[in-house]
Image (cartoon, grey):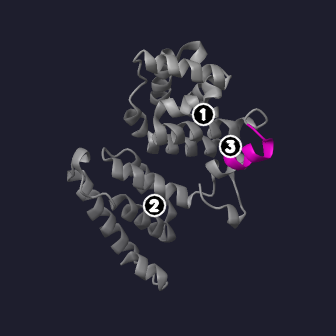
Amino acid sequence: MIEALNEQGIPIPRQQLESLLDAAVKILDEDDPGDSEYVSLDSLLAELICRLADHDSDTAAQRMRVLRKHRHPHARSASQRARERLSPLKPIKAALRGYKIAGGVRGMRDEHRIVYLVFVLEAEVSNGGWWQWVANPSGAYAHETLDALKTIGANAAAIEMQNAMRVLGPDGCSAAQTIRQRTIDQLMTSGKSLPDDGVFWQMRDELQSLIYDYAERFPEAFRITDERNSGK
């Protein structure tokens, strides 16, 4: 219904938007996060918040702040989705562009490098686990990535990474990919395991929120005005 109204350019009254938001949040208030049937509710909530912002950006921002602290992961995901759509800052897009311009991690400006390293870590671990992250070129920046997590305030994620680095040891955190790969083979042969990937995966929305918190401290580094580069 909301998409159909948007396509026809029909605005949804503010009062109706707030009523729909209240009803959706009430569902999540009573829902079991561990066995949720409302897998698409985060998308609906995000859309409602974005439409509310057309009427009152301050109220929409307050709604996002409340949802960010909600116990239900769908509520937290909705908050971050809406934030990414409404924010004039595009930290991940800017960081990826900075990486391309610099030709690698070493030449990036500090703000872009911090966001880039956190983004790559989250993407690698979520996609293929800690083993994938350390085996790929991203593993060469273990210590810099740990510092990046701490810089944006991702303390829980930093602890998980420290646990992984403790198992990997110095050679597993080496800048040389061949040394890391040899260490991985040795660890896997001996039955060693890295921290649960799922624990880190559940931190995704919070990591994204912290990236945006960090970007807001350095808006000039993360503002992209070119519409062709809109997105994260």
Main secondary structure found in the magenta portion: helix
For the residues bearing labels 2 and 1, Cβ distance under 8 angstroms? no
Q: N-terminal of the two: label 2 or label 3?
A: 2
What label does residue 60 carry, if any?
Answer: 2
Mark 1 residue element: loop
**Residue 144 x/y as whole percent:** 64, 26
SS assignment at label 2: helix
From the viewer's perspective, tell me whether residue 183 is left or right of residue 69: right
Viewer-closest of 62 and 182: 182
Callouts 2 and 3 close, C-beta under 8 Å? no
Amino acid type for the residue under numbered disc 2 = Ala
Question: Where residue 150 sits: x, y (%)?
Answer: 56, 27
Q: Earlier in the sequence, mark 2 or mark 1?
A: 2
Q: Residues within 10 Å of mark 3 (few under 14, many from 20)?
A: some
Residues at marks 3 and 1, CA–CA distance in whole angstroms: 29 Å
Q: Is residue 98 magenta?
A: yes
Query: Which mark is on residue 48?
Result: none
Residue, disc 1 = 136
Residue 134 position in % (x across, y down):
56, 28
Q: What kind of residue is marked 1?
A: Asn
Q: Residue at x 54, y 60 (%)?
A: 85
At horizontal 38% and vertical 62% (from top left) the residue drawn is: 45
Question: x and y percent of residue 207 in the render?
Answer: 50, 40
- Segment colored magenta: 95-104
* Dot 1 alpha-carbon crowd within 10 angstroms: few under 14, some 14 to 19, many 20 or more: few
Q: CA distance from mark 2 to mark 3?
A: 23 Å
Residue denoted by label 3: 218
Magenta stretch contains residue 69:
no
| Label 2 vs label 1, nearer the camera | 1
**Labels 3, 1: front one:** 1
Which quarter shows the N terminus? bottom left
The quadrant of the image that shows the C terminus is bottom right
